[in-house]
Amino acid sequence: MLYLIVQMGILSLLAATTAWADMNLGETAYVTGDYEMAFQELQPHAMEGNARAQFIVGRMYANGTAVNQSDTEAIRWYELAAQQGFYLAQYSLASMYFYGYGIEQSYKEAVYWWHKAAEQGHPDAQARLGYIYRGGKAAEKDETEAAKWFRMAATQGHMDAQQNLGLMYAKGQGVPQDYISAYVWWSRARKQGSKKAESNLVMLKPLMSQEEVSVARQKISEGQQPAVE
């Protein structure tokens, strides 16, 4: 009896190992552009409830790779993965709702799912919320909330969030006006290639004292984050 239990345990372990290998094979095929192989390997895992596989299958339907393009199918798979807490699917599902791809447009649903992804640390979702709360179109305008989400994304190195957070500090929107913080964030965005940040720094420097510029440069050289108000 003990022998049979051990054997069953070994078989279960082998099955799990094989399934994991197939999942890795599918992901590798997707990344390298072998979409037919990717779909063949990942679709069974998606059917079994694997959230990562569901997300990739959803993306394949959204892009029409190895399958006929279908926003409806993309949403179906994204939602299955999103409901399991998979943040990439939550972000993609939010985008579908925001633009009305394959589903009735709903800013409320878009904001809901972007929040879910942002709360898990997704920098693009955090930056999206920054735009939404700053613009006041998809949700009630709240510059303090906008600055909060821009800051979260900016500290992860999101260039556009850094540029926009710098702008909010320069204008005193949602945060106290602070040229030093604006200088720091724009400098970081410029380092990543932001032309807007570069232009903004040119306009900002004449408004700052030499002491303020020195403090800002010191913060940058030490890798400090501007203080959170």
Image (cartoon, helix red, strand yellow):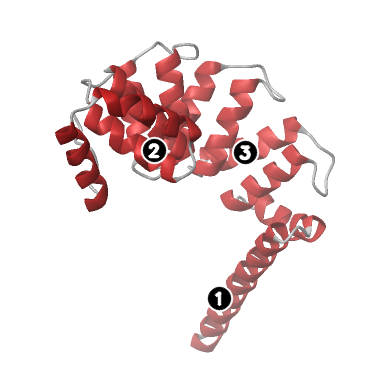
- Looking at the image, the residue that sits furthest to the bottom is 3
Instruction: Identify the mark nearer the N-term, 2 or 3.
Output: 3
Q: Which residue is mark 3?
A: 78
Instruction: Identify the mark nearer the N-term, 1 or 3.
Output: 1
Image point (68%, 42%), residue name? 58
Indicate the position of residue 7 as horizontal and vertical percent values. Answer: 57, 84
> What numbered label is drawn on residue 153?
2
Amino acid under disc 2 = Ala
Front residue of 18/127: it is: 127
Instruction: Decide: is 188 above or below 210.
Output: below
Which quarter of the figure has residue 96? Answer: top right
Image point (57%, 43%), residue name? 81
Crowd band around label 2 with a 10 angstrom C-alpha radius: few (<14), some (14–19), many (20+)? many
Q: Tags 2 and 1 in contact by the CB under 8 Å rule?
A: no
Q: Which residue is mark 1?
A: 13
Left or right: where does residue 52 sit relative to residue 171? right
Amino acid under disc 1 = Leu
Image point (74%, 58%), residue name? 38
Q: Nearer the viewer, mark 2 or mark 3?
A: 2
Indicate the position of residue 34 as horizontal and vertical percent values. Answer: 78, 60
The image shows a total of numbered marks equal to 3
Q: SS for tag 3?
A: helix
Image point (29%, 38%), residue name? 184
